[in-house]
Amino acid sequence: MISSNLASSFALENSKIFGIQKKLELNEGYQKTYKKMDELLPTLPRSFWLSNHGIRGSMLIDDHFNPRPTDIIVATSPKCGTTWLRALVFSIINRNSFDFNNHPLSKANPRDLVHFLEAHILGDRSTVSIDGLLSPRLLSTHLPYSLFPKCMTDDASSACRFVYICRDPKDVLVSKWHFANKLRPKELPPLPLEEAFELFSNGVSHYGPFWDHVLGYWKASVEWPKKVLCLKYEDVKEPSGCVRKVAEFLGVPFSPEEEKKWIVEEIVKLCSFESLSNQDVNKSDTRSRENPMSNSDFFRKGEVGDWVNHLSPQMSQILDKITEQKFQGTGFSFH
Ligand code: A3P
């Protein structure tokens, strides 16, 4: 049995968020982690804005996740293109397994094809089912790079690789704001953009500060280019270059024969906003109290620069200034 306090709140949160409540006898190792969480959660200094779920997920990964050298982790800050990147990586690594005219991406949302690491571990309350997945495992995460255990991040030759995507923070804010309002309970008034801007620009956002999230992965990609690949959502305009880059990074470059068969272009088309958002499975609006997000919530406009339609010139200048200051001297920019 796990310690009472945490056990009850945890089960409650789990059943609310994931719609599941599993009764598991947890071994001594897990009991220790849950006890540690119980003691630590209220006292933790928070360098990132993680929910209690995020902190628990990160602690479970720290203590129990066994990375493998073949693991591929799609990492993102929310609203930076998680859906697109999950689809791209899934279709790149499985390109010989499926027919493009009858592909899993036409029947399932990318989030159902790529396991969301921390949510999955939290849902199960252990790493048991993740441990049971066949290699190569394709996983995704919103966790900042620095919150992964050292064995996953420190050494270029160590277990797992990360494919990261980030996006101009002005578009991230607008996307987040729309998303937050979609999920907001109907009893509440819509979240004003000014309020969302104030929070985001002060670093207060899910898994934020946004800029620190980007910097963690960017710096790692500079130090260990074979371990971390950093992409920009803005590359959506040049998707074929992006597809080739990801394939090379993952050690499965496109052969001349594949190039002749236009496989890169097939993948680009399959994963495009137009194609994915028009699949029936992604049009469904299945939001409920137990499952607050529906597939359609992950598709809005899919454009670069939609911020001009929402942010005031002053808001955009402030965000650009923060971006410039934060990334100064790092070699990173969104241009
Ligand atoms: P917008 O709100 O700007 O339209 P995430 O997947 O990280 O939650 O990000 C969601 C954002 O990515 C949304 O941006 C969504 O429309 C966009 N998006 C979803 N699928 C996409 C795709 N296949 N190609 C490009 N953008 C996509």
Image (cartoon, rainbow, N blue to C red):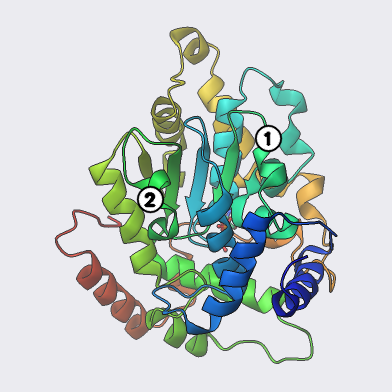
At label 2, which amino acid type do we have? Lys
Residue 168 at x, y percent in the picture: 38, 62
Q: How crowded is the residue under tag 1: few (<14 C-alpha within 10 Å), some, or many (20+)?
A: few
**Which residue of the protein is positioned furthest toward the front in this rendering?**
28
Residue 96 at x, y percent in the picture: 63, 17
Q: Quadrant of residue 148 in the image?
A: bottom left
Query: Which residue is painted at 44% across and 36% down in the image?
Result: 159
| Residue linked to disc 1 | 133
| Image position of 157 (left or right of 269) | left
Residue 212 at x, y percent in the picture: 34, 67
| Residue linked to disc 2 | 150
Query: Which residue is painted at 22% across and 69% down in the image?
Result: 324
| Image position of 36 (left or right of 326) | right
Query: Which residue is painted at 80% across and 56% down in the image?
Result: 25
Note whether 199 is above or below 170 in the view shown.
Answer: below
Give the foreground label among 2 and 1: 2
- Give the quadrant of ligand 1: bottom right
Q: Is mark 1 within 8 Å of ligand 1?
A: no
Q: Is residue 4 visible?
A: yes
Q: Quadrant of residue 335 in the image?
A: bottom left
Residue 1 at x, y percent in the picture: 78, 65
Q: Quadrant of residue 203 in the image?
A: bottom left
